[in-house]
Amino acid sequence: MRAFAIFAGIALIGAMIFTVISFSSSPATQQAADQPRRETLQERLKRLPGDYRGWAELGLQYVDQARVTGDPAFYTKAEGALATAAKLNGRDDTVLTGQAALAAGRHEFKDAVRLAESAIDANPYGAPAYGVLADARTQLGDLKGAQQAVDKMLGLRPGVAAFARASYAAELRGDRDAAREYLEYAHADAFSPADLAYSRYYLGELALHAGDLKTATGWYAKALQAYPAYTPALAGQARAAALDGRLTEALDLYDTVINRLPLPQYLIEQGETRIKAGQRADWTLLDAQRKLFQAAGVRDDLTWAEFLADHGDAGQAVKHARAEYARNPNLVAADALAWALFKSGKPAEALRYAEEATATGWQNPLITYHRAKIEQALGRSARVDPGFDPTLSALARFS
């Protein structure tokens, strides 16, 4: 899900949370580009330690680095820089937006909403704060409030960031045509290699989840033409190859993806592809990444609920899913709880959450499959898409 996967290296785990500074990037090239910029900013802050917006910008850069590298240690650095900015001027909208971005990156979405709204109170014309607000409200299941924030952002600063959020909002209400149209607007507006790659990648994701592997593969290739180091597009190629039965090619691609960016989502996809190819999945690195995120203060019960329901202890999956849904009652959390309950032998209780996950008309193949299996277990008539492969369920999660 595009808006979850969204601010942290966790971004790509079920959604997409956008950063405030840069909209899309890859670890290899973005780090190379950002490093001298950050050093220059740090030098400036040594000369001008009272520059609160400079400290806020540094914090935002660290938040972005956590997202593109998958290294949650950057959140701790962001926290320090933003704390300094807040001490100097805690009412500035840039500082508040940075704090909201950090809260969203750590999946503290209620705090993100509060801080983003404070930033908007300080400066009603600051488009980035509306972007963070839209993302956080989506995570909290407030789709109406998220749409209002998206509309405000479109009015203030129509561009890649606003169009992509509008696309995601349309997709969640089941309007694939509008979702594609907004992404095409984003693509037309993009001029940097990163923005071109980003918009092309998500056009590929729309096609992939509609079952059009050929079109999806074409968009992923075009994304890499614009930005060869854009790892999500490489992961998209791996996904498409696996779903097309080209497992050896997919695993070779996943090896490159994991070497660049060992996010939990990619590790789970690689593991499932290995199982499909008759190999053993090794979840050691996944467990290590989980501990790193926990140490950095990132709460991500969603990933572990989804993973454990398919590959571990269903009872523990329910525990994580309930915790996630209690904090963030969104569509993906409802689906995760439904599936965990089903896998733990409770289809009657699961049905309520499966119905909630599909109530908006969102045409996601994974949640559609989950609901159909739950309804079948209850003796209801439900059609399971014969083209959906449940052994590769992680590949159907929207990144």
Image (cartoon, rainbow, N blue to C red):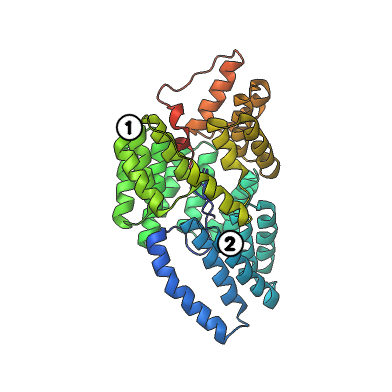
Reading the image, the residue beneath label 2 is 75
Residue at the location (48% across, 46% down)? 285
Q: Amino acid at mark 1?
A: Asp
Q: Would you say the residues marked 1 and 2 are in contact, meaning their CB atoms lie under 8 Å apart?
A: no
Q: Which residue is mark 1?
A: 244
Q: Position of residue 313 (x, y in %)?
A: 60, 31
**Badge 2 density bin: few <14, some 14–19, many ≥20, Cα 10 Å:** many
Between circles 1 and 2, the one closer to the viewer is: 2
Q: Secondary structure at mark 1?
A: loop
Instruction: Kindly tell me whether residue 3 is visible in this rendering.
Output: no
- Whether residue 223 sits left or right of residue 170 in the image: it is left
Most distant residue in the bottom direction: 47
Residue 131 quadrant: bottom right
Residue type, mark 2 in image: Tyr
Q: In x, y percent, where is residue 204?
A: 37, 43
Name the residue nearer the viewer: 143 or 292: 292
Image coordinates for residue 367, horizontal then vertical, percent: 53, 31
Counting residues from the start of the chain, the first of labels 1 and 2 encountered is: 2
Residue at 54% across, 40% down: 172
Give the percent coordinates (x, y) of residue 10: 53, 50
Residue 251 visible, this angle: yes
Q: Foreground residue, 107 or 140? A: 107
Instruction: Determine which quarter of the picture holds residue 24.
Output: bottom left
Residue 236 horizontal side relative to residue 107, left or right: left
Vertical relation: 335 (above or below) 137: above
- Secondary structure state at the residue bearing disc 2: helix
In whole angstroms, how far apart are the C-alphas of marks 1 and 2?
37 Å
